Amino acid sequence: NAGVTQTPKFQVLKTGQSMTLQCAQDMNHNSMYWYRQDPGMGLRLIYYSASEGTTDKGEVPNGYNVSRLNKREFSLRLESAAPSQTSVYFCASKPGYEREKLFFGSGTQLSVL
Amino acid sequence: GQQVMQIPQYQHVQEGEDFTTYCNSSTTLSNIQWYKQRPGGHPVFLIQLVKSGEVKKQKRLTFQFGEAKKNSSLHITATQTTDVGTYFCAGPRGGYQKVTFGTGTKLQVIP
């Protein structure tokens, strides 16, 4: 099993460009998450999807959109990238019930110049 | 701002010394989880605490959940170089699906 797969692993964008980060899980999980990690800030929740067909804002949703394409896939879109969005992005999933652990992908390192 | 703070932000210890990180939430948590992220890696689940005052041990690691369920600690006895990484606490806020993380403590172990 691959677990949680994120693509791409690295990306460099110019300010104003758009891109979509892809995430797929093969564990039949209901809930999926997007976090960003910045030095000294820990992991901050951008958006999450509790189940297929639903999405909700996290702590830092501004500048991002998400799509829960199906049960397996949850994408994160930057419509007009800004330097402040330079970060490492992690996708995670869990079965969807209370008190379960998160499984993380290997991350996408994004630089916006 | 971040609602779950961890202290310290960084810690350098000599191999063999003990290490403790503290996690403080502004609100009561139904449960708290701890994750470890190795340098260049992704967070990996370590343990979950659910009950008030709960203490759990994993070999040299001791985890504690506060009586008020607003704080938690992770203590490592006799650190080893394999303990290097960033340790995060996490808990549900605004519903059990909304899992938020603390600011993390980065541990460096000097051989």
Image (cartoon, coloured by chain):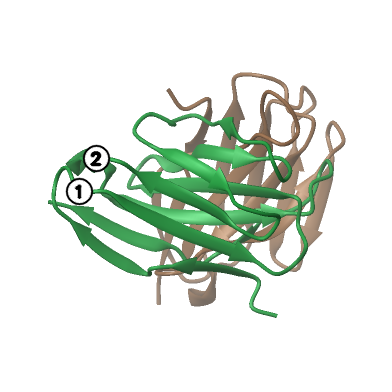
Callout 1: helix, strand or loop? Answer: loop
Quarter of the figure with residue B8: top left
Q: Earlier in the sequence, mark 2 or mark 1?
A: 1
Quadrant for the N terminus of chain B, please.
Answer: top left
Q: Which residue is mark 1?
A: A17
Q: Badge 1 local density, few (<14 within 10 Å), some, or many (20+)?
A: few
Q: Residue at x 68, y 23 (%)?
A: B94
The amino acid type of the residue labelled 1 equals: Gln
Quarter of the figure with residue B23: top right
Disc 2 and disc 1: Cα gap in Å? Answer: 5 Å
Residue B3 visible? The answer is yes
Per the rendering, the colour in which chain B appears is brown
Q: Residue at x 72, y 46 (%)?
A: A52
Quadrant for the C terminus of chain B, please.
Answer: bottom left
The amino acid type of the residue labelled 2 equals: Ser
Chain identity for the colour green used in the image: A
* Mark identifier at residue A80: 2
Near-viewer residue (B31 or A35): A35
Callout 2: helix, strand or loop? Answer: loop
Q: Position of residue B10 (x, y in %)?
A: 38, 49
Most extreme residue toward the right is B51
Most extreme residue toward the bottom is A1
Q: Is residue A45 left or right of residue A1?
A: left
Residue B102 visible? The answer is no
Q: Label 1 near label 2: C-beta < 8 Å?
A: yes
Near-viewer residue (B69 or A13): A13
Q: The numbered mark 1 sits on a residue in which chain? A: A
Residue A44 drawn above or below residue B76: above
Q: Badge 2 local density, few (<14 within 10 Å), some, or many (20+)?
A: some
Q: Is residue B100 left or right of residue A9?
A: right
